[in-house]
Image (tube, rainbow, N blue to C red):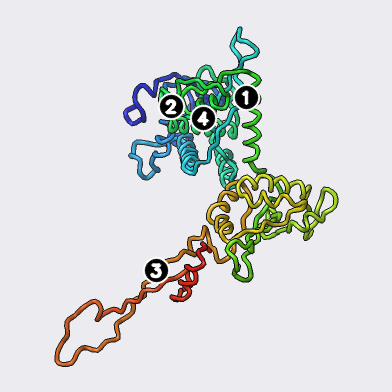
Amino acid sequence: MRSLPGDSASRSAALLHVDLPSRGIQPLSSPDLLVDAEDTPDGETSLATWQVAGCLLSPEDALPWLARLPERDRLPPQVTLGADVKFWRMVARFQLSLLARQRFVPALPEPVAPAAGSQKSQATYRAAWQPSLDDSADRTRLEQLAAAMPPVCRALRLPDDPANPPGPAGLLTNFLHTVTDACVRGWAAQSAATAARVPVRSELRWRNALLRADPAVDGSAGDLARLAGQVNDWLAQLRTDGDAAFRLCFRLEPPEEPPVERNERAWQLRYLLQAADDLSLLVPAEQVWQARGQKLRYLDRRFDQPQEQMLAGLGKASRLFAPIEESLHAARPEAAALTTEEAYTFLRETALLLEESGFGVLAPQWWGRRGASNRLGARLNLRPAQQKAPSGGVGGMSFERIVSVDWSLALGDEPLTLKELERLASLKQPL
């Protein structure tokens, strides 16, 4: 008990039920323990429910405790972690990764069951923070964890819990939702004075419920139902269809010649459809608009409802980048024309937001990953000094007599002359 996190107020002893393979009047030993077959009783094996003493932890205490559990080679010789503990350790580290990357969103799920005798015109909803699993890598990791869940993870329950627990995917989702809500709510807790005020608007009551321990949002049933619908519509816009055969992709194309005027829209942000299973397969928007009917065939591939999918994707992306919204005034938008400053904003800020939202982004090859390789910097070149010792004796030894130092400026891997640097500075543009 001393090694468990939190104080005595945040944890409590509890009597738990656990379903274990059993023979006779005792459960079988864990396969993680080295037990001789002679010690195993004879008879048929069946699943039986046993009572065990345990300790209940709050989600915000259990998460760091699980994540910090050491690997096997760092455990004391007399300590062995069960398969369930090792599994939840992996889940806890995945959960911490989601929280560290701020992969969570506010939500307003279905209303709680009304209390007996309550007015039908009033309702109570529960504000909650939920994990955001829009990234394909996160969804894949979640599927892998659900497939790897040991059966013992579903064996432990409280006495009042149903005998049939949810499946691995449901249990894993419950864990992520519960821990996400508890941790974010604790980090964003408001002061008691602010939380004590009850706003009139349901939107503000929902906001306050996200930032305090009590998640209840009370109010008019009609107002809260309207708010819940708006929140769900907003969340739907953030989600991407992970099973879609293709997605909207943006390709930034620089001008062939440097723009003459600073506000000249010489850059082109092209719109394309990108196959999910072959990222090199790109369909230009021009061909999408030329398609007839609900299907488009391109390079022996079929795209269902391509025009509807492109318009829906552009509508979502327009909320992240204003030039995309401006291009939607055209009946069949194919690209957005950008100034140099807008292109720089796209590369430095918008591209990451679009990728996080499930869109494809193709930047110029010279930009590099996140543009880190194309920053202006200084280079230090060292070479042996080509100097003869002074005549008439041995001269003084110094660093300059041993090494020749040459400083130069470079843009990424390309060195710059003084004239090139002055020209770049005179443009007063980021690219």
- Residue name at image x 64 percent, y 31 percent: 230
Position in image of residue 87 (x %, y %): 49, 38
Judged by depth in the image, the label closer to the viewer, 2 or 3, is 3
Dot 2 crowding, Cα within 10 Å, few <14, some 14–19, many 20+? some
Judged by depth in the image, the label closer to the viewer, 2 or 1, is 1
Q: Residue 110 carries which label?
A: 1
Name the N-terminal-most of marks 1 and 4: 1
Name the N-terminal-most of marks 2 and 3: 2
Answer with the quarter of the image where residue 144 lies. top right
- Residue name at image x 51 percent, y 25 percent: 209
- Residue name at image x 31 percent, y 81 percent: 384
Judged by depth in the image, the label closer to the viewer, 3 or 4, is 3
Instruction: Give the SS element for disc 1.
Output: loop
- Answer with left or right where residue 373 lies relative to residue 400: right
Dot 4 crowding, Cα within 10 Å, few <14, some 14–19, many 20+? some
Name the N-terminal-most of marks 1 and 3: 1
Residue that protrudes farthest toward the left in the picture: 393
Dot 3 crowding, Cα within 10 Å, few <14, some 14–19, many 20+? some
Position in image of residue 103 (x %, y %): 53, 41
- The amino acid sitting under disc 1 is Glu
Q: Which mark is residue 58?
A: 2
Q: Are marks 1 and 4 in contact (CB under 8 Å)?
A: no
